[in-house]
Amino acid sequence: MRSQIEGSRAVAQTVARCRPEVVCAYPISPQTHIVEALSVLVSSGELTPCEFVNVESEFGAMSVAIGASAAGARAYTATASQGLLYMAEALYNASGLGLPIVMTVANRAIGAPINIWNDQSDSMSQRDSGWIQLYAEGNQEATDLHVQAFRIAEELSLPVMVCMDGFVLTHAVEDVDVPSQDQVDAFLPPFEPRQVLDPDDPVTIGAMVGPDAFTEVRYLAHEKHRQALTVIPRVADEFATSFRRSSGGLVRPYWCLGADTVVIALGSVLGTLKDTVDELRAEGVSIGVLGLTTFRPFPYRAVRAALRGAHRVVVVERALGVGMGGIVTADVRGSVPDKPIATVIAGLGGRPVTKRSLRGLLADAVADRLEPLTFLDLKRDVVERELS
């Protein structure tokens, strides 16, 4: 049903229609509205059978999700920022055990200093944890990605993060088509776990593995992520057929065909980038945008194909690899090592990324005046004073 609805509540309603049997909840802004809305659906009896578990920490939330999934239940949770870091140990256990947990990450900056606003430092810090990472451009895509995430997770027996920008999306009220229960049921089959902890048929999972087998275990995890590069676009195609709208997949090109300059980004900043590029195209500038929906596994071939005709590439990043620069850039460079690539660090800690700033940035890029690493709207007088 299409309605004006907050992004968090659209996600909560959609997750409920995916019929999770266990929802683990620990509040941390800006994801709290999601689990709050799910708690109401459980307590009212609208979401049943489902156990809503209030835990003592984010580590507890992921631990409960692991236990529930290992016991054969469809499990879901949500977190953000320091909460994601607090569950980091359990994140690796969830992926290492091959458990198809789905989790929303409402992207938020990591302190210190404390900052509750949006950037993508939190999920980027866990990029090698073995979780599939999907990034939403808007609230419609955030809603759609959760339905797809359960399909992808359960087909591959891998956990999936759906990353949506905190406050910018989670608290924004937009026109969203929340899928009906019948639509979701037709697309998402009942959960059939590949492994179940059953007292009547005891087994051990996650036991200690020595040097003679650990490399093979990690290789198999890597291979499952490689398989995901085929599964994710197929699920997106099936979703488009069933729901009559396109979302998800690996990458989403916009004006990329024949563009001299292509800008790459993830998440909600893509909307502002597309508006800016529309204006530049109207002025005769040959420029396009490549949105990355899937960041892990990284879609090297899809990125390479989308950038084939580009003469220069600009990567706009909402996180910083301290001492290195661009995080996404490193993977993009692996896709197109022969092309000049500039990194732009933008929007850290929720600083607005405006069309005005982007127009100046992209003008410099097109004129080949952009430095290899740029901090958009950096207050140079402040940093120079502190450095001195």
Image: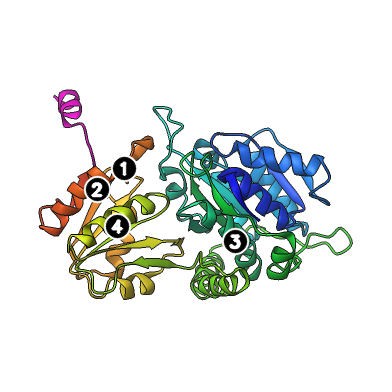
Which of the 4 image quadrants contains residue 38? top right
Tally of numbered discs? 4
- For label 2, count other residues whose C-alpha is less than 10 Å away and answer few (under 14), some (14-19) or many (20+): some
Q: Rounded to the nearest whole Å, what is the CA distance between mark 4 and mark 3?
A: 25 Å
Question: Which contiguous range is marked in magenta?
Answer: 376-388
Residue 157 or residue 376, whichever sits in front: 376
Q: Which of marks 4 and 2 is in front?
A: 2
Q: Do the residues labelled 4 and 1 touch (CB within 8 Å)?
A: no
Q: Which of marks 3 and 1 is nearer the N terminus?
A: 3
Q: Earlier in the sequence, mark 4 or mark 3?
A: 3
Residue type, mark 2 in image: Leu
Residue type, mark 4 in image: Thr
Q: Is residue 78 above or below residue 113?
A: below
Q: Is mark 1 on a helix, strand or loop?
A: loop
Image quarter hosting the N terminus: bottom right
- Residue 353 marker: 1
Relative image position of residue 216 (x, y in whole percent):
54, 70
Relative image position of residue 59 (x, y in whole percent):
62, 40
Residue type, mark 3 in image: Ala
Q: Which of marks 4 and 1 is in front?
A: 1
Residue type, mark 1 in image: Val
Residue 74 or residue 49, whichever sits in front: 49
Instruction: Find out whether residue 318 is within the magenta segment.
Output: no
Q: Rounded to the nearest whole Å, what is the CA distance between mark 3 and mark 1?
A: 28 Å
In this figure, which residue is indicated by the disc labeled 4? 329
Q: Rounded to the nearest whole Å, what is the CA distance between mark 4 and mark 2?
A: 18 Å
Q: Earlier in the sequence, mark 2 or mark 1?
A: 1
